[in-house]
Image (cartoon, rainbow, N blue to C red):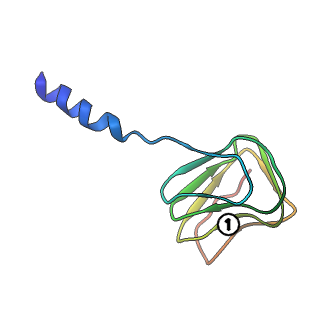
Amino acid sequence: MQRVLIAVMIVLPFRAIAFGVTTCGQTVPPGEVGVLQTDLAGCDDGVFLANRAVLEMAGHAISASHLGVQCIDERCAVHGPGDISGAVVASGASTPREGSR
């Protein structure tokens, strides 16, 4: 019984917590999940995603004049539902990306 309790105590502190995206120009750190908390409007650039970062649109919208969402490293993903308008979506070097809808 003690082995099971020790294993649970070691695993629980490493639980992932979502990264809240609330303003234009934020970068979701490598390997993290960013959750859009509100609509972003009037941005030059919306959200930047580091390597293996994910943006959960959570039904919100990004309206940007330059880049809506940009992968700045090897891989990233955008999960909808949500809307990205007025900008290039998920711009970057040839990397696998998923759409926002």
Q: Residue 52: where, in percent of width, then height? A: 51, 61
22 above or below 95?
above
Picture residue at 64% right of the left edge, 59% below the top: 98
Image side of residue 16 versus residue 97, left or right: left
- Density class for disc 1 (Cα within 10 Å; few <14, some 14-19, many ≥20) is many
Residue extending farthest to the left is 2
Give the quarter of the image for residue 2: top left
Q: Residue at x 58, y 72 (%)?
A: 95
Q: Which residue is mark 1?
A: 70
Rendered view: 7 above or below 83: above
Image height of 69 relative to 7, above or below: below
Front-most of residues 70 and 97: 70
Is residue 38 positioned above or below 86 on the image?
A: above
Horizontal relation, residue 11 to residue 30: left or right: left
Locate residue 11, reporting x and y percent: 29, 37
| Tally of marks | 1
Which residue is found at the position 60% from the left and 70% from the top? 72
- Residue 38: percent from the left, percent from the top? 76, 42
Task: Please state which amino acid type lies under the numbered disc 1.
Answer: Gln
Report the residue at 35% width, 41% height from top. 14
Where residue 40 sits in the image (x, y, percent)? Answer: 80, 50
- Name, please, the residue furthest toward the bottom: 93
Image quadrant where one finds the N terminus = top left
**Dot 1 lies on which element?**
strand
